[in-house]
Amino acid sequence: MTVKPLHDELLSSWTCRLAIANIVQPARLTRALGAPSFWRGDPDRDASDEDLFRLARAAEMDLAELGALRLSALLSLLGGDAATQGPVPLLVPPRAQYWRAGSAGHPACPACLREQGVFRRTWRLVTTVACDTHHVTLVENCGRCGAPVCVTRAHASRTFPRPWRPEACWRCGDSLPAAPDPPVETLASALAVQWLVAEAATTGRVNLQGLTLSGAELAGIVRTLLHQLLGPVGHLRILDDERAALGLPSASRLRSVSTRSARRLEAVALAGRLLRGGLPGLLETFGALGLTAMDLLPPGAPAPSWFADLGYDQLGRQPRVRRLTFLPSDFEGLTDAQWARADPLLPPAPIKRGGQQRLSRRRVLDTFLARPVLGSGRGTWLATCHPHLHRWAEGGHLDQALDALLAGLREDAGLNLDDTGVLATQVASAPTWATSTLGALLAPDLLADLKRWDSALHTPLWTLAGRLALETRQLHLPSSG
């Protein structure tokens, strides 16, 4: 007999239901089909393509439909890889000692198990702490004997087959207990994060208070927040005001005997509370706690797209703020040594009648670098310098000239543009011409022009500006309203 997978069902859950329909233990079924190693480790993560092919052929199912039951399909849009060795940060790890009372089990909703009899894939996500159908928290252990919930242990009994009750404990046979109702504010805040991650896992993009984030960016932010809340340092455990708003006890009153699922519920609810104002509000909270926004980014990663959105949003709300970093914005012109580097890379200027140049190329480049600082003379800029710069950008000459200026900052001023942590300390002792040139190159208006011209330097300069601003907490944050 064959069974069809239900919506959001785990591969291991479907395999168990297939075995029950054919009155055979799951391990014997997979062994008979030529997949003896299916149940070793975590089959929802580690099931091979060959094992899936054998199961799909026996169950007369499409291989792609069966492969969609694996966790890799769920994590592909969240920037995670379930096929890698070791723990995956976004997944609740499987427990090897499922026979030990009190050890953490598989998160599940007893009501969903009683109604549908399947374990869902999204229950394996760290951010899934409540059932969005019944609005109750998930349970991981039996309330009578403390045995951990396990999708396979109930089908491994020697007395198999027996009446299958997925909502019952595999050890004592008692029904899984209903989880205690959390405060309404806690449940609503946790579900907000849960829905955000679920949307990112489905579409690959989410909208967070007007900022568009990819699934990987949202997963990275949420993962970092949970690490700060549950990690050994626990910077954010001191948020007693936020805990009081969610109906949670203060951090000083937390009992060490609280279960892992209860701590995870509190962490996800606090993460939702911190994200209620979007990323600007979150960065403000980080600054008040003495943390930097770099804690939201993995080491060595480029500045994410949401930083660019914040920068452009800042220019729209605060047009007089012409810089995102602490670098000076008093650029007055290139030095002779800098111009000597850029001059051979620019095309000759058009010649007027009488043999004179229409406009000095050095003046055009100086005006381009100084325009974000001056903030005025927009009409003069469009009428004179912009056509020349547009022609340079189309021919690739502008990128070559700006790249030569960056090389001069590395060689002549000794600035390390590859490590923002070192660069932040070098700027204090760097010459004025170097810091003013770097500040002009990292100005948002200049970067916006480079983006409009499809410049190859736009991405590396945005990355440098983003990491430097976030690392030094110099980003002028707009209000979330």
Image: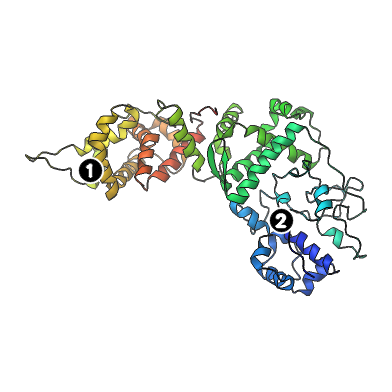
- Image position of 25 with respect to 106: above or below: below
Who is closer to the viewer here, 162 or 350? 162
- Residue at image position (50%, 32%) is 472
Farthest residue to the left: give it.
Answer: 354
Local SS, label 1: helix
Residue 189 placement: quadrant: top right
What's the residue type where badge 2 is placed? His
Local SS, label 2: loop
Q: Is residue 352 left or right of residue 384?
A: left
- State the image coordinates of residue 107 (x, y, percent, origin top left): 78, 48
- Of the 4 image quadrants, the one containing the N terminus is bottom right
Crowd around label 1: few <14 · some 14–19 · many ≥20 (10 Å)? some
- State the image coordinates of residue 59 (x, y, percent, origin top left): 74, 70
- Residue at image position (68%, 64%) is 66
How is the model colour-coded? rainbow
Q: Is residue 81 visible?
A: yes
Q: Nearer the viewer, mark 2 or mark 1?
A: 2
- Of the 4 image quadrants, the one containing the C terminus is top right
Residue position marked by numbered label 2 in the rendering: 7
What's the residue type where badge 1 is placed? Asp
Q: Is residue 394 left or right of residue 420?
A: left
- Residue at image position (49%, 35%) is 310
C-alpha gap between disc 2 and disc 1:
64 Å
Who is closer to the viewer here, 303 or 69? 69
Sequence order check: which comes first, mark 2 or mark 1? 2
- State the image coordinates of residue 296 (x, y, percent, origin top left): 58, 39
On residue 443, which mark appears? none
- Image position of 34 with respect to 196: above or below: below
Residue 63 placement: quadrant: bottom right
Q: Is residue 459 left or right of residue 339?
A: right
Residue position marked by numbered label 1 in the rendering: 343
